[in-house]
Amino acid sequence: MANDIDRQRNIAFVGPHHAGKTTLVEAVLAQCGAISRRGSIADGTTVTDHEPEDVSHAQSTTVGFAHCGCGPIDVTIVDCPGFIDFFEETKLVLAGVDAAVIVVDADPSRASHTQTLVDYLETRKTPHCFVINKMDRPGADFEGTLEALQALYGRHVVAEQWPIVDKSKANDKSSGFAGYVDLADMQAHAFSGDGETGSAVPGEILDRVKSAHTELLEAMADFDDHLMEELLEGVEPPYDEVARDLCDECAHDQIVPVLVASAATGAGLGALVRAMEKWFPSPAQAQQVDAEGRTIPPDPGGPVVARVIKTMIHPQSGKLSVVRVLSGTIKSDATLTDISANDEKVRSGGLYRLQGKKQEAITEAGPGSIVAIARLEPVKTGDTLTSNGHKVLLPRVPLSEPCFAMAIKPKERIDEAKIFQMLARIVDEDPALRLARADITNEFLLLGSGEQHVTIAVERLARKYKVEVDMAAPQIPYQETITSGTELHSRYKHQTGGHGQFGDVWLRFEPRERGNGVTFDEKIVGGVVPRQFIPAVEKGVREALMHGPSGYPVTDIHVTLYDGQYHDVDSSEQSFKTAAGMGVRDALPKCHPVVLEPVSRVTVTVPTAYTSTVIQQLTGKRGQILGMNPADRTGFDVVEADVPQVELSRYITELRTATQGLGTYSARHERYDPVPGNRVGPKAAV
């Protein structure tokens, strides 16, 4: 692999969930002879969906790696999960590839599901093409899907193939997908049992195919003045020129070709493989830069520079760090420097190429390679590895903040000691997850990008490390405060023989402005309460305020100790602490207490078409709409609102359901407000 950089292609297969990415990857592997028999999603036998969670949920829940030799090229394929909950992991591995195949159903309504992904690819200037999959399905609508994609992304998204449909073979199980026309050379290809055969363009689509051919040339002419001149003069450009422009402009992410395929039948796979060879850049052509914008040349003899794009941990065999090598050659026993971890030295425990769950040992890997290195224990996803003290730091991929949380605790007390260590390993594999301790409720929280993201992580914890946990919605950290003041005398006197207990205090209670917390003061004159007992009074006050009349912590209150009595023999710190606590409990009901709920400042980014829906959602959640403005992303709006935290427990799921997965939001604590009617649910309510 070290000397074959021009042959290499590193390609991610991405797209909405259930678009058929994994089935298409399986078909490509079979087409290229990397596997002898195609696996099945239903049977759980595909190469890249090999994790038990993938099988049980019948969808990718983590990235999978595979490779195949396709004629003159050697392709490393990264199969990315399509469900939006796992998009952060997809972002991390996209930093290690040079191109992407976006797989989308032949259904116009599904085109918009690609928007977040396409925006990210275009921000990174990653070359990509669309494959309209499932063309064999009844009702497959290529032209409608193409128009939907062009409406979203512009005319640089252009058909390079046009499907041929044999209506005589269409039935309730098949669309009659029989072949395609290559719009670059205007040659028709019919599918047969042996692959593809040349055929004439069917007369019923000839005019539409000619129009699509012109659209393809016009899209490419935007980036080629000579081609533009030929079109203006009415000259049909030679195929060699068209093919050259197509390769160059796709490799530079100037146009986005659209292909047709059926992963289930294998139709169109040969053309897709040829497109990956011709249109997508090799690592030698794909420019890589460090954090300071300096180009990193893909020199096999230079210092090693590699990026960790994925971490895998097996309970028995240990840790695998999947890396993309940008420069230099990594040996199987190499000692590397983790620049991201204070130049810590790490030694490779083996070098492997991944074919699903199979690890194929190799001796070295050069620039452009995507390989797994064993037992780099301190290394994390996103880290930069170098050799020979080479000081190069690669830019990290920014991850979105988690927007869904669950409170977790082990089902068995015996697991309490190891749950944190095991969860840390799960987070090591998936940096989009977070662990946190809730400030007021003290619950242990697992946070992620959505409900399924967190649920899958808990399933993986149980399978890998035999730690079963109970999950519940996090408790809402309600608090209480007072709306009026009072003064109260509290005496604790207890005599049991010998020394007794005596504490006597006068306390004044006053409400404070929101956000000031609990404060304590003393105005003792003449030593009626000795100095050594005043800290005990404050401690008794603060402890009693941890549980107000409704059971929640009391805040925004000022307590003053202004009088009292003591006994030379019977008074003690404990007696004054007890007297103070009794005084607090007696006084609070007289101060007209109210329950406070946390209110979050919510920022929702949503396509303009769904803005009114989101405003209705937030209003229905007792939200106070603060404003709406255009977002940085074209066609999106930003809605700001203050919403009670209790209403946000499952909001990310509701938002994605209402916006076809395109809406996102962030929230931060803003303030506490009284609960309307002073009514709240149980302490664990959400």
Image: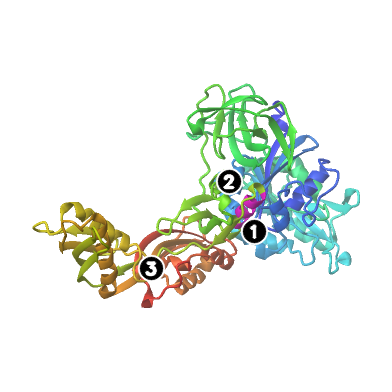
N-terminal label among 1 and 2: 1
- The picture places residue 205, in percent across and down from the top left corner, at 80, 61
The Cα–Cα distance between marks 3 and 2, rounded to whole angstroms, is 34 Å
Span of residues in magenta: 455-463
N-terminal label among 3 and 2: 2
Residue sitting at x 60%, y 44%: 429
Query: Residue at label 1?
Result: 149
- Identify the image's colour scheme: rainbow, by chain, secondary structure or one colour: rainbow
Image quarter of residue 493? bottom left
Q: Which of these two is toward me, 653 or 28?
A: 653
Q: Which of these two is toward me, 528 or 479?
A: 528
**Badge 1 density bin: few <14, some 14–19, many ≥20, Cα 10 Å:** many
Q: Amino acid at mark 1?
A: Leu
Farthest residue toward the right?
Answer: 193
Total labels: the figure holds: 3
The answer to whether residue 432 is left or right of residue 583 is right
Residue 55 part of the magenta segment: no
Query: Residue at label 3?
Result: 551
Farthest residue toward the bottom?
Answer: 677
